Image: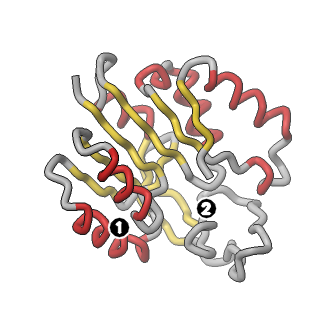
Amino acid sequence: MRKIFVDCGANLGIVLRQFMHELPDHDFYAFEPNPTLLPSIRANVERAQHAGLVEVSPSAVWTEDGTIDLFLGHHESSTVMPGKRVPPMYDQQIDYSSPVPVPAVDFSAWLRRTAAPEDHVVVKMDIEGAEYPVLRELLADGTIDLVSILYVEWHHDRFPAMSLPEHDEVAAAVSTRVDVRHWD
């Protein structure tokens, strides 16, 4: 049995480093599509001095492999999802006029290749609205059952097109299959 931690939306790598200290017996995988954040992630990984496996992928967690447009804003608000409203605490709005093409990873397929049913898999998912299509895919194909613990930051309130009932439906369905812990 492997112990695996997956950081979907690693941002600056600070949370990744924190979990590397808290879970020294886990292998770590991190996904972050914003290329400007990769040096910070790598620096935080080096500071953690983790003896086990650590892989950082400069990719967006998504529902298919390929390329997807990343819309840049403040480092905590960039998204692959159109129509996001940025909370007023951020001084930089999302630039929808100049998307940056980034690699995308079909997270469900990646999870199937990486984890086995007997593994203990912890996923932290903070992917700025993309959690809804990604989690819907995991539910539809059953790969959600490979996840033991899911830390998730929900972003339904930042997308005018996302209704509360839609959010509640996904959140409830995921909660029946995995130990969900709110991430903020």
Looking at the rendering, which quadrant does residue 47 occupy?
bottom left
Q: Quadrant of residue 69?
A: bottom right
Residue occupying the far bottom of the picture = 91
Q: Amino acid at mark 2?
A: Thr
Q: Nearer the viewer, residue 61 or 147?
A: 147
Kind of residue at disc 1: Ile
Tag 1 residue: 41
Q: Position of residue 137 (x, y in %)?
A: 56, 30
Which mark is first along the chain, 1 or 2?
1
Picture residue at 46% right of the left edge, 54% below the top: 60
Give x and y (percent) for residue 85.
78, 64
Q: Residues within 10 Å of mark 1 (few under 14, many from 20)?
A: many
Residue at position x 66%, y 56% in the image: 81
Q: Nearer the viewer, residue 69 or 49?
A: 49
Residue at figure coordinates x 34%, y 47% from the top left: 22
**Residue shown at the point (61%, 75%) measured from the top left:** 74
| Residue 122 to residue 1: above or below | below
Name the residue beneath numbered marker 2.
79
Q: Quadrant of residue 26?
A: top left
Which x, y percent locates residue 7? 42, 49
In terms of secondary structure, where does tag 2 sit?
Answer: loop
